[in-house]
Image (cartoon, helix red, strand yellow):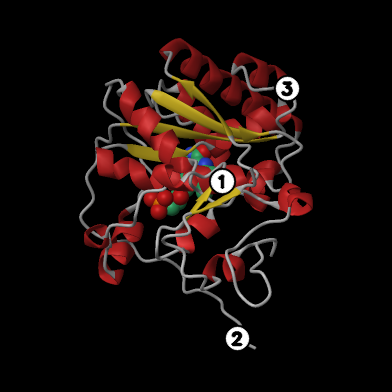
């Protein structure tokens, strides 16, 4: 049996699946007929599911993207442009968290949704580490601060481009956590070196996760300082059980925000060139 399963009682032979196929391997027989993929081309299928999604008749199922697992889009859940713009602009970096654990079901839902972010060539190779142990998180922050301290000692000129780094050390020494902000959860997305667009894929997946989090009352913040330390200190990757062959990684803090925001802060005007 081939990759495509056509319900011949529903298929209108309109060719929409063939036109939308990413690798153009879906064919319609000359003179009309039902769509098919010839067996020698099946290995070119990127399993993107466009053929299932684009059929208005629900006539096409894919061996690896079954129609039963591809729910119909609900018109009543569509959001307006104004809603979407406000939603995107209300996303904030959260740096103060309640000392409250995040339910595992919520973390699961966030990651389950983040896997729908686009990946290069639909490779879907992003993997996840979820850290909830306070002592592990604290230890990561401490090692990041030590790394920064050494970095500034070895080359104080770094502070010229990143003057806030001394503030980070001062805050840590005063008993604050400027690295992971005492977040109850740190989620790390990573991808193996085989992932063609691994660096981009993990950022997109984390962006999906970050955008969904506020709908559950949660907030996030990108942990750039920790990621810098992760890039510099292989031992830190071991502390986090990050797979050895995963050069692409980025950690995100997660927790219940203490702050509530009432306005949408302005940003720089975009520099755009139209040609
Ligand atoms: C790649 C990246 C790394 C970041 N690293 C940190 C970080 O280590 N600590 C922090 O407090 N914020 C970090 N941020 C958050 C930015 O400072 C924040 O996005 C910016 O100030 C704008 O604020 P907003 O996210 O609330 O719009 C990071 C953001 C990005 C995109």
Q: Looking at the rendering, which quadrant does residue 237 occupy? A: top right
- Which residue in the protein does label 1 denote? 203
Q: Is residue 184 toward the left or the right of residue 16 in the image? A: left
N-terminal of the two: label 2 or label 3?
Answer: 3
Quadrant housing residue 193: top right
Dot 2 and dot 3 residues touching (CB under 8 Å): no
Of helix, strand and loop, which one carries label 3? loop
Q: Position of residue 222 (x, y in %)?
A: 49, 40
Where 83 sits versus 138, above or below? below
The residue under the point 58% across, 42% down is: 202
> Could you tell me how far apart the alpha carbons at marks 2 and 1 are, in whole angstroms?
27 Å
Give the class, few, some or many, for how many residues have Cα within 10 Å of label 1's Cα (few <14, many ≥20). many
Vertical side of 116 occupied by 166: above or below: above
- Residue highlighted by disc 3: 244
Q: Quadrant of the C terminus?
A: bottom right
Q: Earlier in the sequence, mark 3 or mark 1?
A: 1
**Mark 2 highlights which residue?**
274
SS for dot 1: helix
Please, is residue 258 above or below residue 4 in the view? Answer: above
Residue, far top = 135
- Category of crowding for the residue at label 2, using alpha-carbon neighbours closer than 10 angstroms: few (below 14), some (14–19), many (at least 20): few
Residue occupying the point 30% across, 20% down: 101
């Amino acid at each position: 049996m081939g990759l495509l399963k056509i319900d011949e009682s529903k298929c209108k032979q309109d060719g929409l699946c063939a036109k939308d196929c990413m690798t153009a391997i879906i064919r319609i027989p000359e003179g009309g007929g039902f769509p098919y993929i010839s067996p020698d081309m099946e290995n070119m299928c990127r399993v993107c599911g466009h053929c299932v999604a684009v059929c208005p008749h629900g006539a096409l199922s894919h061996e690896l993207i079954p129609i039963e697992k591809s729910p119909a889009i609900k018109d009543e859940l569509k959001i307006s442009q104004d809603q979407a713009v406000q939603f995107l602009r209300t996303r904030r970096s959260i740096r103060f968290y309640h000392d409250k654990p995040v339910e595992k079901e919520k973390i699961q839902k966030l990651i389950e949704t983040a896997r729908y972010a686009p990946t290069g060539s639909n490779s879907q190779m992003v993997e996840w580490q979820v850290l909830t142990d306070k002592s592990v998180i604290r230890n990561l922050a401490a090692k990041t601060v030590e790394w920064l301290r050494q970095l500034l000692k070895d080359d104080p000129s770094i502070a010229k481009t990143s003057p806030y780094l001394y503030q980070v050390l001062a805050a840590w020494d005063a008993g604050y956590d400027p690295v992971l902000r005492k977040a109850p959860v740190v989620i790390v997305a990573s991808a193996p070196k085989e992932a063609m667009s691994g660096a981009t894929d993990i950022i997109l997946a984390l962006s999906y996760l970050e955008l969904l989090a506020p709908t559950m009352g949660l907030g996030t913040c990108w942990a750039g300082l920790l990621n810098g330390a992760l890039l510099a200190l292989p031992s830190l990757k071991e502390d986090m059980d990050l797979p050895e062959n995963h050069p692409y990684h980025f950690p995100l803090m997660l927790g219940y925000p203490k702050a509530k925001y009432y306005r949408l802060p302005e940003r720089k005007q975009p520099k755009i060139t139209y040609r």
